[in-house]
Structure formats: structure tokens, C-alpha cells
Amino acid sequence: MARLLGLTSAALLAVGITAQTSTYVNPAVPTHTPISGDYTGPLRPQVHYSPPQGFMNDPNGMFVDADGTWHIYYQYNPTGVVAGNQHWGHATSKDLYHWVNQPIALFPPEERVYVFSGSAVVDVNNTSGFFPDQDNGVVAIFTLARYYEDGSGGPQTQNIAYSRDGGYTFEYYAANPVIDSTSPQFRDPKVIWYEDHWVAVVAYSQEFVVGIFTSPDLKTWEFASNFTRHGLLGAQYECPNLVKMPVRDADGAVLGETYVMAVSIQPGAPLGGSVTEYFLGDFNGTHFTPSDAVTRLTDFAKDNYAAQFFYGVPDGQNQVNLGWASNWQYTQKVPTGNLEGWRSAMTAPRVNYITEAPRIGLVMVDEIYDISPILDSKLKTSTCGGGDGTVALDYSSVESGALYIEVNVTNINTTLLTDYSTLNISFASPASGEILQSGFYFGGDTPFFVNRGGIKGFDNVFFTDKFSVSDVYSSGSSDTLASWSVKAVIDRSIFEVFVDRGIHAGTVVFYPSQPLTTLNLASRLPEGARVSVDIWSLKSAWAEYEDEQGVVYGNVTSSGNSTSRRSMVYESNFSV
Amino acid sequence: MARLLGLTSAALLAVGITAQTSTYVNPAVPTHTPISGDYTGPLRPQVHYSPPQGFMNDPNGMFVDADGTWHIYYQYNPTGVVAGNQHWGHATSKDLYHWVNQPIALFPPEERVYVFSGSAVVDVNNTSGFFPDQDNGVVAIFTLARYYEDGSGGPQTQNIAYSRDGGYTFEYYAANPVIDSTSPQFRDPKVIWYEDHWVAVVAYSQEFVVGIFTSPDLKTWEFASNFTRHGLLGAQYECPNLVKMPVRDADGAVLGETYVMAVSIQPGAPLGGSVTEYFLGDFNGTHFTPSDAVTRLTDFAKDNYAAQFFYGVPDGQNQVNLGWASNWQYTQKVPTGNLEGWRSAMTAPRVNYITEAPRIGLVMVDEIYDISPILDSKLKTSTCGGGDGTVALDYSSVESGALYIEVNVTNINTTLLTDYSTLNISFASPASGEILQSGFYFGGDTPFFVNRGGIKGFDNVFFTDKFSVSDVYSSGSSDTLASWSVKAVIDRSIFEVFVDRGIHAGTVVFYPSQPLTTLNLASRLPEGARVSVDIWSLKSAWAEYEDEQGVVYGNVTSSGNSTSRRSMVYESNFSV
């Protein structure tokens, strides 16, 4: 959970509220039924998760269950399009692209106490004792953040709730908190299983400390160690993740495994606002020991924060994560709030493992997860055996407005490269003249860049226009015939690129005043280089759930006691 | 020295060249006399150093001599406005603002061998043996970089040259190189004195290693240790600096001293291109041991690279540095080349020491050096005892176009701050509508921002528009009456800000199509806050050296054998 510094009392107290005996529920927030949403707006991503209505930030509690259902929860203000009033929204998916909105999973337990970020685990062996007769019990561990009447922050404590129905509904544990604290800056527990015990990493945000705790049962926690003041500090540490993943060679063969400690910093990222960094190292069940002093970033742009790794991926497999595709510097101002009643999407799901990148050494790969479930038609396949080539595509007939693009360049004679050896991919709106540019320079400093400065539907003093990363795609002077690749998804208001097998990834939100409908790709490369381009339209992952009015209701049948669909269309007064 | 990756053979070989017996001199490059320059162009900084003509990058060889004369040398292409053909340009100053151009100090020793970055020391005790009868001998140590006819890079070796006239003219040492190498990526030696020996730090750029060498005499060097893979890697390490500086409390009292290891990375900065990071630690004469794993950046914007600390500042005093105010991503494209025949300025000089910043802990202060020598008239003094205030100023009559601004805000009741508590400073051109914005948000995430996106004289896909840094200016909830300050210099095409006593600094170049001539300052702060604003015009540091045609000739008398001023006006064909 983020944005403590910026939470104004006005935002937090915008909603009229009354107390209830057990779990506090704001009467404006529906229980036991999903909130419905209109996913048809021109800025609404069609293959990314975004909340039905209201304001979303960090992903929380992510796990995959034994049936292969992926669960995401998220920081959710169901009563407005700015941050505040944090609940845990919930959605499920079988493929990480088609999401079914579920009823809100966690509600504030009392007035002015909010459910901040955290994680969830499947307690297969009933270590907690909450699940005597089942192996699919889910325990969520999260921060409860108290605010006083004057808007100032009270203690943040770590608490648990358990679900006997596989993560759809939760009961607060009676003996909360499980990790007490008097600090107003102590939050975002992420729990994993290590051999014979649970391990939680929790941020002491303004001390730049990740506290590591252990537990046999998720209820009693013992302090184990601190990991402190590493890498970029920004002005706060948030949302730590500790996760083990395979180390693979360039062909994918497993060479070993290592731990990753990811820390989100907010505010104070080098590009402004929010960013996530990570450290490689060993973990012995109580202590994380970094293997070097290198600071690595998960994203070269500005819109991927607080990513969480799904709990439950089998040991030895690649990890899977998704993050919040926004930045606290402008997330509460972007135009989707006023225009379409929602704010913030998640990134596409990503696959993670460690590999050796040319020159820079070990990095965490962040590569788009299998996109086949939403691939629609192949709009274009182009192979160019010379150096120069262009592809022009009008995709205005693609209903989703979403494309997937793969470009592979092989046989690059590196001795012939110049500063002008480029591959450019741009998307434009002929109606408005807006343009989103991206591209790679093969010579010189080898930057991949994205420029959203030509998009005119939103701007403010923090909405940085240009991003770039140097991608050393070919090292060693003997290797004169190099290869390079990029994968990209464009989805109405979000653009994600995965450079050179995901060694670098960039997430860029943009808000065009008119839909982008044309693609232009141009390569200028030395003789002999082979460029292959494949462009697919993407199926909307939301359209199939829409009724004739375009409304997505989510899962209105699974969790009982809902009234009719129609009556549950959620109405609210959004304050912006 | 940077830009190896991007040096094309075309750039390097743009000049016709013939060999000479001892020191190779391109006949197009004047010797023994300064190159003249026109410093009157509308984009030409008036209180910053920029070269008379041609292309400049990294500062080199910086030292202050026993008479208090500050010497800067710099990577210099005197025959074009793009990188290549590296010489060491030279200028001197008594106050770090008024610079006198000197004859070029170091020339390429042979064809296709260039003088890359390095440093200089005053060999007071004649450890080198070059200076039997003097205590002001200067030894420069630098990289010679060989390029082959096909443009590919050969070995980079470390070499020395000595000056018996205080740094104006140099002789190459006969037994060069002093640190040999077969690596094409080994460069930028920076030398300091440690107790009883010399210490050099040199970058193995693409291995992300700073090699530490020791020497008794500057001629024989011994490998001592490596400092490796620390912080952000980017795609190369360059221009390391190792320097000792005092640790001071908020009142300036000395608490101790510490070493700073600064490393410039290029390409691959988080914001794209070039940036400098630094690490704090101990140095025992052979090994640098970082005191923590924190990665700190010297600048929150994109235009301060390869800064060097002056050799010769007395032990125990604050250090002094200046950097190259540009970025390799666009430095060879900026419009000063075509319009005015020069490219790149240095930053203003800065004073450095270590202090404890609120929350984030020890940081290197980067505060503007005593600016009094160029202060002209105080244009405005405004003190506002309420929360809201504005200052509007038309400074079109200021001939230099340069201003210095100090804003101090005190008595800030932090419990009354909101996300809308701001102080904004903007500069505009009424003629063109261009605007350069900056400002601070006192509530929320406390960002200071600069936005050059409203300036229209230059753009490319790497010329990022917006920069920000979170400045935690007040920590501790008991401290409800906080203070905050900013100092800023605007100088035609360069804007530098020093936030909260230099805890954060930002350097931003910008290229307006029309001069900026109006300033607007507006504060919106809680009742009781006191805002004091002082604005001075700055005297051009160049105008006093101009002849009636506006030409600055530099020091044409000091180094002998020049012909008349008039005949030495340097003419060249600039290739852009």
C-alpha cells in the first residue's frame, strides 16, 4: 500500500460512514456481490485488468489455487476515483487475461481503519488451524492502517483473515493483530513458505528497512532479521517481495536458483514518484544476503509499481507477477476517472526468471505471460531480408483496439551499424494527429525508447513524456552477427514492451483524445539483416462478459445471497 | 571520457590530418594561442563555462593552484560541433565564474590516437622528478585511446604529461604509457594524494569495475584493488572520482570526514543516457570500502555528467566540483551547434560536503559555489507573511538574461499542509509563449519539479521534458514548524536548482526559440508561513572580455609566440 504521505483527510473521509458490530461495512459499498462495470470506454484496456468502477492501486494477495485459478486482490476505493477508503477488491482468472470480477473480499474492520496491502497463501497443511477439513484454505495477511479524526496516521499493524471458500469470502482472525506495532509506517506483508515455516517480509517504510519475520502457523510471528538501506531509497520503501526463481541460460536450461528481494520505492523514484527495484541473493529461512551491491530496476518507464509475485507457483518453475500500471505522481488525475469512472489498470502478467544478460550480468527477466488466449487474427506477417523495410497497418477495424506485436531481427552485421541503424514502431490517430513512438537504435548507445509526448489527452507536470533503456543485445567483438527482438502490447491506454526476451521491460500509460488506429514500423539496418514482424489483433477479454448494455457484472452467482443482477448495478457519486 | 560506443569513424576522421614527429597536431587546430569565441548568442550561457567554439564534453584535469587559480581542462573537439578528435581544452578562473580561455593544453600524440578524460595534480614535492626547481609542477594523467582505420577501438592506456609553467603547456612523458592495457574499455584516471602516495581510480568501463592503483611518483603504478559492480550499472562505468570530504551537521559544524566514490554511468541511466551516482565509504590508501549499499544520484535531472572534483582543495575543506551539463542522448543534436557554433556548457561550480538529510540519512550536498562575483542588481526582494503571494518580474532589460533566485520559506505549519500547498517558479517568453516551470509541493510526496516541455526550440525522442525529486524537508512529527529553501540560476539555456541547502540538485538545459524574459513566482501555503524571495540579475562573466565585435579572444598574451589577435580568429568548417 502506498500513498500514505498523500492521503488527505478529505480523501479518506469523503464517504459518510457508520460503524457495525463485527466487520465494518460502509453502507455505500455492496457486499456479497461484485460491483459491475462498463468496460467499453475508449480508454479502457481490453486485455488488462482494471476495476469495474472506482480507484485501484497495488495488487494484493495474489495466489494461484490448486485448480489453476489465479486470484488477484487489489487496493480498492469502491466509492471514488481517488485513493482512500481501502478495501480489497478481488478478481479471478484461468489464463491471467480473462478476469471475472468477484465480490469485494476484505472490508475495513472499523471506521477509519483501512485494509492496506498484503498477500495471501494457501494453507494446504492447515498450519493455521483455521481449516480442519480442507486443503484449500486461504489466509490473507495485510496491514490495517488507522487514521485519526484529524486525518493523521495512527499505527499500522499486520493482521490476518481466513477464507474457507477458496479466497472468495474472508473472516477476520479474532486475535489480530498478528504483528503489532506503534509505527504509522509499517506495512505491506508478503508471505512465502520456506521449507518448514512461513516467512513474511514487511516494510518499515520510512526507515528503509524490510523486516523479515517467521511463523509456524501464520498467527504467531517472530522477528528474524532486517534487510536495510539497500539500493535507491527514494523517500519510502514499500511492498517488499521475497521470492525464489530459477536461473536459466539463454536457451532456457536451468542452471540453479536464486532469491529476489524486490522493493518498491515511493515517492522518490529516479524518474519521479514510484518505481520497483530488486536485489539478488540468498535466503536461509531467516536472513536475506544479497549476492552483490547492484541496484536493478524492474521497468525502464514510470508505470509499473508494487508488483507482486503469485503465491503457489510450483517450486522450480518460473515465477509470475503483475504490477500496478500507474504512478502516484499522477494516478489520481488521469482522465479515465472523469471520463469513464475508473482509474488504474494492472500490467499484463509477466513470467520471471534470472538470466545472464550480455555485459550487465544477472538480471530478472520480465517477459509477457503466454498471450495465446487473447490472440485474435494475425493482421500482418512481414519478413524483410534487406536492411530497410516498412510496415503500415490501419487497425481501426480491430474492435478491441488492442494489438500484439513481435519483431525479430537477426543476422545483424554489427560492424556495419551506425547511429542511424534503427527500428521504429509508432501508433497514431489520423483523426487527432496524436502519436505514440517507440523504437530501438542498434548502433551507439543502443537505447530502446518510448515517447508518449505526442499523445494529447492528458498532461501534468509529472507526466514525463520520454523513457529509454540501453539494451546491450550483443556483446563480444567476435559476435558480429547479432540478433535482437521486442514484444509489445498496445491496449487503448497502456503500452508494454519487452525488449530482448524481457531483459528490459517498459510500461507506459497514455491517454489519447482519439483512439490510435494506425501502426507504422520502419527498419533501417545494414544489408543482410533479416527483420520479421508479426502483428495480431487481440480479442477483448471483457467483451464476452458484457450484456447488451455493455455492462460487465462479474461473478454474481458464486457467492450467494445476491439479489438480481439489475438491482446490483452499482451507483455512486464519484468525487474527483 | 564518454561516448565510445557512439563514436563513429566518420566523426573521428572528419578532419584531414598529417603526422608530426613528437606531438601530433592537426594543422586545422591552432597551437599556442586560445581559440576565440563569440559568447553573445541568445543560447550562450553568460555565467557558465562553455567552449569558445566546437564541441566540449567531460571536464578534465581540474585543479586549483597555490595562487588560487582554478584550472579546468575539458574534452574538446576544436574542429567540429560533434564529438571526436579529442583534445584537452583549457580555461582558468579566479572565482569559478569568470573564465579565461587558454590555448589547448593537450593534443593527440599521433594520428587516430585521442586524448580522453583524466585528471591533474600539482606535484608540490616533485615526486615525479619532472620539477627539480619548482613546487608548482603539474602532472596530467589521462587516457590515450587508439582507433583503427576502420573506426574500431584499439587499446586504451593511461599516460602522463607534465607542465613546468603551471598547467598551460604540457610535455608528454617519454616512457608512456604509465598504466598499459590491451583493453579498449579502460579509461578516465582520476588521481589524488593519500598520506604518502598517489592513488588513481580508473574505470574498466564495460566490466563495471573501478580499478584502484597506487604510485610513489606518478610514473610507476601498482594495482591495489578493484571496486566492482556497485549501484546502478547502466551499460558502462565512466569517470570515477574518489575524494574525501567533511561530514557536517545542519549548522555546518564538522562531525568527521568520509570518502565519496562517484561513478558516472553512460549509457543506461534511469532517465536515459548519462548520470552520476556515488557511494560513501572508507579508504585506507589501497581499498575503498562502502559504508552501506545505498545508491545515491548527484542530480535529479538529466544534464550533469562526469563531474570532477578539483584537485588541491586543502584537507578538511569542502570539495568543489563541476560537471558536464549535457547528456549523450542528445548532446550532438542540440541547436547551439548549428545556430551558434558551440555545443555543451559546464554546470555552475558546486560546493560539496556530507550531511544528514531528514529521513534519508547521509547525502552529499551539491550547493552552488559563492555566486557573489557575478551578482549584479537585486531586482526584487519580497517577503510575504501570509500563505499566498506572487512575484512577477519582467527581466527583459537584464543584458545577460541570467538571474539568481533565493526563496526561503519558514514557519510552515506542517499540520495544515495539503496536496495543493505549492510554490511555483516559472520563466516565460511573452514573444513565443514558451515556459520553463519549476516548483515544490509541500504536502503529499514533496516533489520538486522542473518541466522544460513548454520550451520549443529543440526536441528529440530522448529530450525528456519533466524531472522531479522527493525532498523530505521536514521529518519528525514533533517538528510542526518547518522550513524549506531553494536556490536557482537561470542562464539563457541552462537552469540549475539547489533544493533545501543542496540536498538535491537538478541541472536542466533547455533551448528556447525566443529568450525567456519574465519570471512568475506564486506561493500557496498555510496561514503563518513566511516566504522570502530575493532575485538578482547576474553580470555576464564573458561580456567584459569581448571586443567591439563581441569576440572573446582568451589569454592571447600569456603563453607566448602568438601572432596578432586579429589573425588568430579561428575559422573552421563545422560539420554537424
Image (spheres, coloured by chain):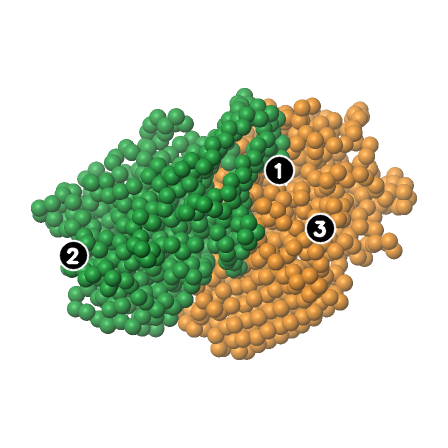
Chain colours: A green, B orange
Chain of residue at mark 3: B
Residue B518 location, quadrant: bottom right
Residue B488 location, quadrant: bottom right
The reply, left or right, for residue A313 in relation to residue B74 is: left
- Locate residue B265, reporting x and y percent: 55, 41
Residue type at tag 3? Tyr
Location of residue B44 with respect to B411 vertically, above or below? above
- Front-lying residue, A229 or B139: A229
Q: Is residue A293 visible?
A: no
Residue A369 location, quadrant: top left
Residue occupying the point 18% across, 48% down:
A166
Verify CB contact (< 8 Å) between mark 2 and mark 3: no
Cα gap from disc 2 to disc 3, whole angstroms: 74 Å
Question: Quick one: SS at disc 3?
Answer: loop
Residue picked out by circle 2: A560
- Front-lying residue, B455 or B4: B455
Residue occupying the point 53% across, 50% down:
A429
Residue picked out by circle 1: B2
Question: Quick one: SS at disc 1?
Answer: loop
Which numbered disc, 3 or 1, marks the residue that appears first in the sequence? 1
Question: Quick one: SS at disc 2?
Answer: loop
Q: Which mark is residue B49?
A: 3
Location of residue A21 with respect to B337 vertically, above or below? below
Of circles 2 and 3, which is in front?
2
* Residue found at the far top of this picture: A478
Of circles 2 and 1, which is in front?
2
Quarter of the image containing the N terminus of chain B? top right
